[in-house]
Structure formats: structure tokens, C-alpha cells
Amino acid sequence: MPAMLPLPHVRPLLVALALAALLGGCSSNDDQFAPACPGLALLPDAADVTRFDGHGMDVTNLVVRGGMTAVPAVCTKGDKAGTVTATLHVDADFTRGPAAAAGLPPVAYFVALMQGRTILREQDFAFTPTFGANVDFASVHGEDIELVVPVNKTKSAASYRIFVGFRLSPEELAYNRTHARP
């Protein structure tokens, strides 16, 4: 096997490439990684809604049944220093019941930002499911929601929680607790 002769012009090129790779990893840009997001949870007792017409609680009295299916969120560095912006939306599926009128009223849901047991912010939104002729199922994509979360060097956005659920009447909440999905 012939001996390898060092090529004088290759070594400076390799050193320059190695230095460029090392310096490329050094950056003063602190936006390299997405910031931590608050924990996100559907409230188990409020993730579904079942509405009846007020004349009973069997299938013939069902107006609408809905269930939240997804709550994707993305966090970015906030516009103001010391903030993180959580952008999320809520997706839900609805089934129209035999007691439904031609146009269903909106179905309210809430998004709450909490720190520990304290509610910092709570806001209501609404789904308006629309059903085509002879169609009893609709998937609805909620509006984009932005929550601005204060952060600092000792408290990240992960120290907060976001809870999502349908705005239920006491009767609807009791129904959910006795008719939980498997």
C-alpha cells in the first residue's frame, strides 16, 4: 500500500471547515428552540356535551352530542419581553339528534389559564356546528386562540396549565359524570 503524503493545501481547508461548523453552532439567537408551553388538558367531565330538548333524556329527546377531539398548541417567544405566546385551537365532533331544530344554537366552550389553583384568565368561545341535508355528523375547527403567558428566568411557561372544556349546565355535568365514555 503506498504511503499517504500530506497535502499542504487540504489541511487549512479542513481546519476552516471544522471552525465554520463549530461557529455555526454558536449563536446569540435565543430563538433556536421553541419555548416551553403550559401544560394543556381537557377537563374529563367537560370534554363532552349532551343536550336534550327538556322533555326527557332518551335518544328521541337528543338535540346534539359533541366531543372535543384535539387541542393542538404551539408556543413562541412573545412580542413583549418576558412573555411566551401559546396559540391553540379546539377541534370537536358533533352529532345531531332527532330532537334538533333546523338551526342549532352555538355550543359554548372555555379556555382557562391557571397557575397552581388560581385562574389567571378564562374566556368563552363557541362552536356553531352546521349539518348538511340528511347529514347528522359535523367536525368543527375552532378559532385560533392566543394566550400570553408571563415568564422570567425562574418561571417558564411550563409552570402554567391551560384547561379546556364545554360550558355545561349542572344537569349536563351530572349527565357526563354518570354516562362517561369508556
Image (tube, grey):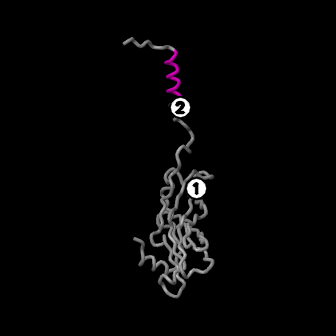
Question: In which quadrant of the rendered view does residue 84 lie?
Answer: bottom right
Question: Mark on residue 154?
Answer: none
Residue at coordinates 56% horizontally, 61% vertically from top-left? 89
Query: What amino acid type should be assigned to the residue bearing mark 2?
Result: Leu
Quadrant into which the N terminus falls: top left
Residue indicated by mark 1 = 85
- Is residue 75 depicted above or below 104 in this figure? above
Image position, residue 69 (x, y; %): 50, 65
What secondary structure is found at the residue carrying circle 1?
Answer: strand
Question: Mark on residue 23?
Answer: 2
Q: Nearer the viewer, residue 33 or 173?
A: 173
Image position, residue 87 (x, y; %): 57, 57
Tag count in the figure? 2
What secondary structure is found at the residue carrying circle 2?
Answer: helix
* Residue stretch in magenta: 9-20
Quadrant into which the C terminus falls: bottom left
Secondary structure character of the magenta stretch overall? helix
